Every structure is written in C-alpha cells, then in structure tokens.
Image: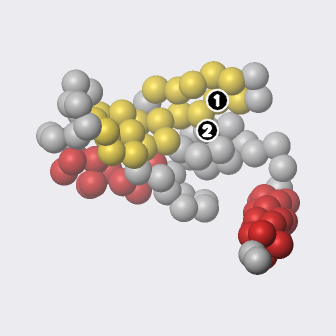
C-alpha cells in the first residue's frame, strides 16, 4: 500500500489499474478499511485506475485527532448552519 505523509499523520491507500485514463475512488464507511473493496478493485482495475484510501482513524492510516462523536457534532453544526443560511435567503 502507498501512503501520503502529512504533519498530522499518514493516510494509506490502495491504487491499482495505474495507466488507465479514468479513475474510480472507493470510500469505506466508519470502522472499515479499504480492504473491504478488494473484490471490486479486482473487477474494476482492468478498466479504471482504482483508488481506495484508509480514511483517518481506520485501517493503516493514522488515528483521528478527535473523537468520533466530535466529528458527528461538527457535522450536525455544519448542516444546521447550511439550512439556517438557506432559509434566511428565501424571499
């Protein structure tokens, strides 16, 4: 697996089918890793460049710098701000 080094950790990813013009990115859900996509990678790599990262805090990537519940609270706050802004923009 390849990886990207950042100041706050590493992000690992699988990349197969190098050389194809089109790219397919596969993103896993919470508490999974890119290994769950191996059957799909094997199928699509003959036609696409397939990239499947281990998202932060999962698989071989570095741990998150915050707890999962903090991520959910942040997402909820961002959604609330979006809807509030959208509602205030209506005539």
Residue beneath disc 1:
10
Q: Residues within 10 Å of mark 2 (few under 14, many from 20)?
A: many
Q: Is the residue under label 1 in contact with that under label 2 (CB below 8 Å)?
A: yes
Which residue appears at 76% of the width and 29% of the height? 8
Q: Dividing the image into 4 quarters, which one contains the N terminus?
A: top left
Q: Which mark is residue 61?
A: 2
Which residue is at the front of the view, 75 or 30? Answer: 75
Give percent across and percent down for residue 90.
Answer: 75, 75
Which residue appears at 45% of the width and 48% of the height? 34
Q: Residue 82 carries which label?
A: none
| Separation of residues labelled 2 and 1 (CA atoms) | 6 Å
Q: Dividing the image into 4 quarters, which one contains the C terminus?
A: bottom right
Please report whichever mark, 2 or 1, sits nearer to the chain's N-terminal start. 1
Which residue appears at 59% of the width and 34% of the height? 11
Q: Residues within 10 Å of mark 1 (few under 14, many from 20)?
A: some
Which residue is at the front of the view, 22 or 63? Answer: 22
Q: Is residue 35 visible?
A: no
> Under tag 2, what secondary structure?
loop
Q: In which quarter of the image is residue 78?
A: bottom right
| Above or below for 84 versus 63 | below
| Above or below for 78 versus 42 | below
Report how many numbered discs are placed on residues in the image.
2
Give percent across and percent down for residue 12.
Answer: 53, 34
Give percent across and percent down for residue 6.
Answer: 69, 24
């Amino acid at each position: 697996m390849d990886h990207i080094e950042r100041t706050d950790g590493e992000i690992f990813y699988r990349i197969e089918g190098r050389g194809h013009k089109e790219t397919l990115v596969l993103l896993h859900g919470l508490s999974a890793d890119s290994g769950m996509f191996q059957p799909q990678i094997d199928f699509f790599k003959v036609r696409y460049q397939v990239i499947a990262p281990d998202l932060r805090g999962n698989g071989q990537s570095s741990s998150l710098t915050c707890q999962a519940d903090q991520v959910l609270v942040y997402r909820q706050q961002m959604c609330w701000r979006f809807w509030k802004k959208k509602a205030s923009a209506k005539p």
